[in-house]
Amino acid sequence: MTELNTKAFCDESKKVFTHPNGFLVMNAKNLIELNGIPCEIRNEFASGATGELSFVDAWPELWVQDWYEARALNVIDSLEMDITSGAWSCCRCREENEASFDCCWKCLQDRADD
């Protein structure tokens, strides 16, 4: 992460992404930083507090300074488009499946047979 004034970052920052999967949050962080936008992950280790906190409040969060918010959201939008762009429907049960699935999660029909 580029050098940040920590106090200014905390006072003037916006949450741009959160997800229960920390790997997706880290991937978003890497892509945002590749676009020259300084950012930080908060709640990275908060999952242990689930029960004391709502499970959603314990998800890792990606934060940027206010003036980078629009640029960071554009990067996040392109990431989310990539994740959902390969979705497919099962020919047997018509269930919508994510691109990462090789077979239907509902009826186990192979994607290759689709």
Image (cartoon, rainbow, N blue to C red):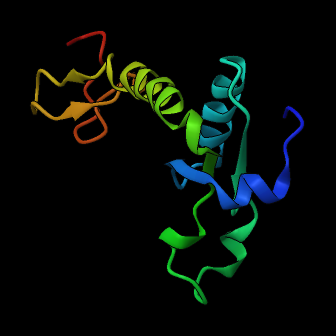
**Identity of the residue drawn at 57% across and 83% down:** 53
User: Whole-percent x and y of residue 36?
Assistant: 71, 20
Left or right: where 16 falls relative to 112: right
**Identity of the residue drawn at 53% across and 55% down:** 20
**Identity of the residue drawn at 41% across and 19% down:** 82
User: Whole-percent x and y of residue 27?
Assistant: 64, 31
Report how many numbered discs are placed on residues in the image: 0
Q: Quadrant of residue 25?
A: top right
**Identity of the residue drawn at 58% across and 34% down:** 68
Seen from this angle, which residue lies furthest right? 3
Q: Quadrant of residue 6?
A: bottom right
Left or right: where 42 falls relative to 54: right
Quadrant showing the N terminus:
top right
Q: Observer-nearest residue: 56 or 90?
A: 56
Left or right: where 86 falls relative to 58: left
Seen from this angle, which residue lies furthest top? 112
User: Whole-percent x and y of residue 91?
Assistant: 12, 20
Residue 102 lies, with reference to residue 18, above or below; the image says: above
Residue 43 lies, with reference to residue 62, above or below; the image says: below
User: Whole-percent x and y of residue 61?
Assistant: 60, 54
Seen from this angle, which residue lies furthest bottom? 52
Quadrant showing the C terminus:
top left
